[in-house]
């Protein structure tokens, strides 16, 4: 079942994300309006690897739609793998602590 969810998520990232609106969402727009965006730039301590859903210029992907699709794919896979790893770690921890009680 988890693999079906991953497949659907990757499909959305690859085929629908490139057609999303480039206008800022509600949170981004509010941050711009009250000036938090400028503070975030000043206090930024880490630059996101796929900032703005774009592949870095190092890879030289000129087509914006392809770049967005690939960054969506990479981001989706990264989050999936982190969640899967965390789930396996927690599952081992819970099963190990449960077996001690018995």
Image (cartoon, rainbow, N blue to C red):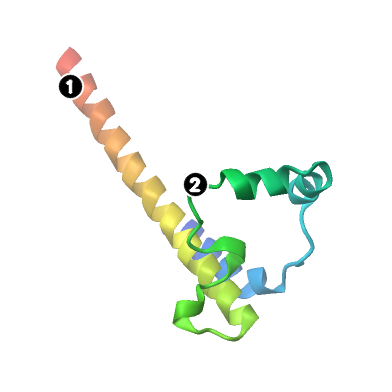
Would you name the residue on which mark 1 appears?
Answer: 99
Mark 1 surroundings: few (<14), some (14-19) or many (≥20) residues within 10 A:
few
Q: Nearer the viewer, residue 10 or 37?
A: 37
- Between marks 1 and 2, how big is the CA–CA gap? 42 Å
- Is residue 1 in sight in this rendering? no
Q: Tell me the tag on residue 45.
A: 2
Are the residues flagged by discs 1 and 2 in contact, CB closer than 8 Å?
no
Q: Is residue 63 visible?
A: yes
Report the residue at 77% width, 44% height from top. Answer: 35
Q: Position of residue 79 (x, y in %)?
A: 45, 53
What residue is drawn where x is 45% and y is 78%?
Answer: 58
Instruction: State the SS at label 1.
Output: helix
Which residue is nearer to you in this view: 84 or 27?
A: 27
Q: Is residue 99 above or below residue 71?
A: above
Q: Position of residue 33 (x, y in %)?
A: 83, 46
- Badge 2 local density, few (<14 within 10 Å), some, or many (20+)? few
What numbered label is drawn on residue 55? none
- Residue 100 image point, x, y percent: 16, 17
Q: Earlier in the sequence, mark 1 or mark 2?
A: 2
Location of residue 17 (image quadrant): bottom right
Assign a secondary structure to mark 2. loop
54 lies left or right of 80: right
Seen from this angle, which residue lies furthest right?
33
Is 27 located above or below residue 59 in the figure? above
């Amino acid at each position: 079942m988890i693999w079906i969810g991953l497949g659907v998520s990757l499909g959305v990232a690859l085929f629908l994300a490139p057609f999303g609106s480039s206008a800022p969402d509600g949170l981004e727009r509010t941050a711009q309006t009250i000036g938090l965006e400028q503070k975030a730039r000043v206090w930024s301590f880490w630059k996101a690897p796929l900032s703005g859903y774009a592949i870095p210029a190092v890879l030289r992907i000129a087509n914006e739609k392809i770049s967005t699709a690939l960054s969506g794919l990479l981001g989706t896979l990264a989050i999936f793998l982190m969640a899967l790893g965390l789930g396996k770690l927690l599952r081992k921890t819970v099963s190990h602590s449960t077996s001690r009680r018995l």
